[in-house]
Amino acid sequence: MLVLKAFGDDPMKSNRFLAAFGAKGGEGISTEAGSLWKVGKMADMSKSLKAAHLSAAFSKPKLTAEEKERKRRASLIPFSRNYVLFRSAICWLANFVIFANLWVWNYVFGATFGPVMFTSILYAWGLALFNTWIIVEPSEVLALILVPGIAKNKYVVRIKTKLKNWGFI
């Protein structure tokens, strides 16, 4: 009873749950040291509540079929995280090198053919960017959102692939 007395009154009187349980005739409840949780209905209730709480806390969430397939495919890839990051860094480096080369070529073109031709090339480039980002991309997104069934049709996919390969979209 050392621990219980150190914190104050008798727990059967200060704790409303224990007092209500004791009033209903909870047999086996004693305030003796070590006997409060080891005997009677209180111990059974405590064990069942702890078991229910632990099973809910540590149970794995149910996975959908798509998530199971994604996890299965992810486990098939034998690449380490460092290799994937290295490959990504190399790809971005290649993008920057290509961009820098095109920038230099554009400067050489402008210096070779003069400011009038260079300005017309810049206007054409700006028009192409406008066409891509303001017209083509939003229209594709709207089409996929408004009519999702069409995007899965095999004929539409084939025509869209051909148009993209030819550079129209």
Image: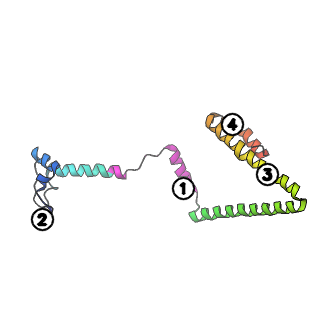
Question: Do the residues bearing badges 2 and 1 touch, measured as CB atoms within 8 Å?
Answer: no
Q: Residue 108 appears at what percent x and percent y?
A: 85, 63
Of discs 1 and 4, which sits in the foreground? 4
Q: Residues within 10 Å of mark 1 (few under 14, many from 20)?
A: few
Q: Residue 97 appears at what percent x and percent y?
A: 74, 64
Amino acid type, callout 1: Ser
Q: CA distance from mark 3 to mark 1?
A: 43 Å
Which residue is rendered at x = 73% and y = 43% of the image? 161
Q: Which residue is mark 4?
A: 154
Question: 131 or 36: which is nearer to us?
Answer: 131
If you read the primary sequence from the N terminus, does the residue marked by circle 2 or circle 1 appear first? 2
Callout 4: helix, strand or loop?
Answer: helix
Question: 11 or 79: which is nearer to us?
Answer: 11
Q: CA distance from mark 2 to mark 4?
A: 78 Å
Callout 2: helix, strand or loop?
Answer: helix
Q: Please give the range of residues in magenta.
A: 55-77
